[in-house]
């Protein structure tokens, strides 16, 4: 999974102040990382089906999102509201 996350280094270019370029860069990196994760899961778990690895990564992302949301609420890091 470490190699799958390696393309995130390109997010440093997210500092370029051109919003459409930022969006395209972020989308490309997210897809690149996800494809790497699918390949890593398929290899590590010895799956013969790519769709099974896709399902595992989607379920993992969903669980990760819930865990991060719960932690954000517990630590008070949620969206700020105007007074």
Image (tube, rainbow, N blue to C red):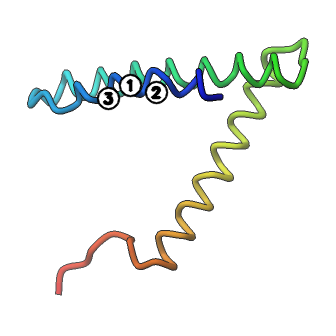
Quarter of the image containing the N terminus?
Answer: top right
Q: Does residue 11 appear to the left or right of 43 in the view shown? A: left
- Which residue is depicted at the point 90% across and 12% down? 48
Q: Nearer the viewer, mark 3 or mark 2?
A: 3
Q: Do the residues labelled 3 and 2 touch (CB within 8 Å)?
A: no
| Residue located farthest toward the bottom when viewing the structure as drawn | 83
* Residue at the disc numbered 3: 11
Q: What element carries label 1?
A: helix
* Residue at the disc numbered 2: 30
Q: Where is residue 22 in the image (x, y as percent from the top left)?
A: 22, 27
Q: Does residue 78 appear to the left or right of 33 in the view shown? A: left
- Residue 45 in which image quadrant: top right
- Which residue is depicted at the point 73% across and 42% down? 59
* Residue at the disc numbered 1: 27
Quarter of the image containing the C terminus?
Answer: bottom left
Q: Label 1: how many residues lie within 10 Å, few (<14), some (14-19) or many (20+)?
A: few
Q: Which of marks 3 and 1 is in front?
A: 3
| Vertical order, 29 against 82 (above or below) | above
């Amino acid at each position: 999974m470490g190699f799958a996350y390696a393309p995130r280094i390109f997010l440093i270019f997210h500092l370029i102040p051109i919003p459409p370029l930022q969006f395209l860069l972020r989308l490309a990196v997210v897809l690149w990382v996800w494809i790497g994760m699918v390949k890593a899961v398929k290899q590590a778990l010895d799956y013969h089906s790519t769709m099974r690895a896709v399902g595992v990564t989607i379920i993992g992302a969903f669980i990760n999102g819930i865990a991060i949301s719960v932690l954000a609420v517990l630590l008070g890091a949620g969206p700020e509201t105007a007074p």
